[in-house]
Image (cartoon, rainbow, N blue to C red):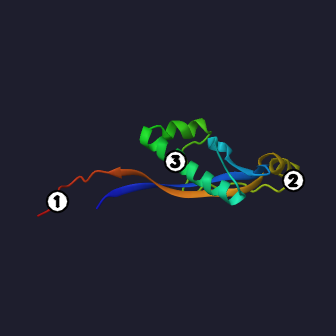
Amino acid sequence: MTETISLEVNLRAYVRRDTARRWIATCPLIAVASQGKTADEARTSLQEAVELWFESCIERGVLDQALREASFRPSLQRESVRKRTTRGAKQRHRAEVLGDEFAVRLTIPGYEAQPVLGAIA
């Protein structure tokens, strides 16, 4: 049996029309963006780009550094509690600039342990 640690990723992203034929999706916190011919295509493309960003960071051994540069810190609580904000002028301005908000959620196999014990005969 291989032992693994997976990372559950939940990030806020935005999608907006850029031109008549192009939609842009962005995940500003980790500075990843993508595009597509439709809003759904841009979202799907961003989902893949975020997954590749995490996989690349893990492969290069720089995930902790990259996340710290994106203002993340290790969580000491089992579940982080976030205050909900009411929608107001700030939310409207964000929608005008960034587009409609959506969530990027994925689970990435992060680390795998080599077997400690050999096969038992």
Sequence-wise, the earlier of marks 3 and 1 is 3
**Which disc is residue 88 wearing?**
2
How far is disc 2 from disc 1 in space, using C-alphas? 61 Å
Task: Indicate which disc residue 29 carries.
Answer: none
Who's the residue at 52% across and 36% down the image? 65
Tell me where residue 115 sits by quadrant. Answer: bottom left
Task: Give yes or no for contact between labels 3 and 2 (Cβ–Cβ under 8 Å).
Answer: no
The amino acid beneath tag 2 is Gly
Point 28% across, 51% down: residue: 114
As drawn, the label of residue 119 is 1
User: Which of disc 1 and disc 2 is earlier in sequence?
Assistant: 2
Image position of 43 with respect to 74: above or below:
below
Residue 49 image point, x, y percent: 57, 48
* Amino acid residing under circle 3: Leu
Residue farthest along the bottom direction in this orientation:
121
Q: Amino acid at mark 1?
A: Ala
Q: How busy is the neighbourhood of tag 2: few (under 14 within 10 Å), some, or many (20 plus)? A: few
First in sequence, mark 3 or 2: give its number.
3
Residue at 62 percent of width and 57 percent of height? 44
Q: Residues within 10 Å of mark 1 (few under 14, many from 20)?
A: few
Rounded to the nearest angstrom, the CA distance separating label 3 from label 2 is: 34 Å
* Mark 3–mark 1 distance (CA, rounded to whole Å): 34 Å
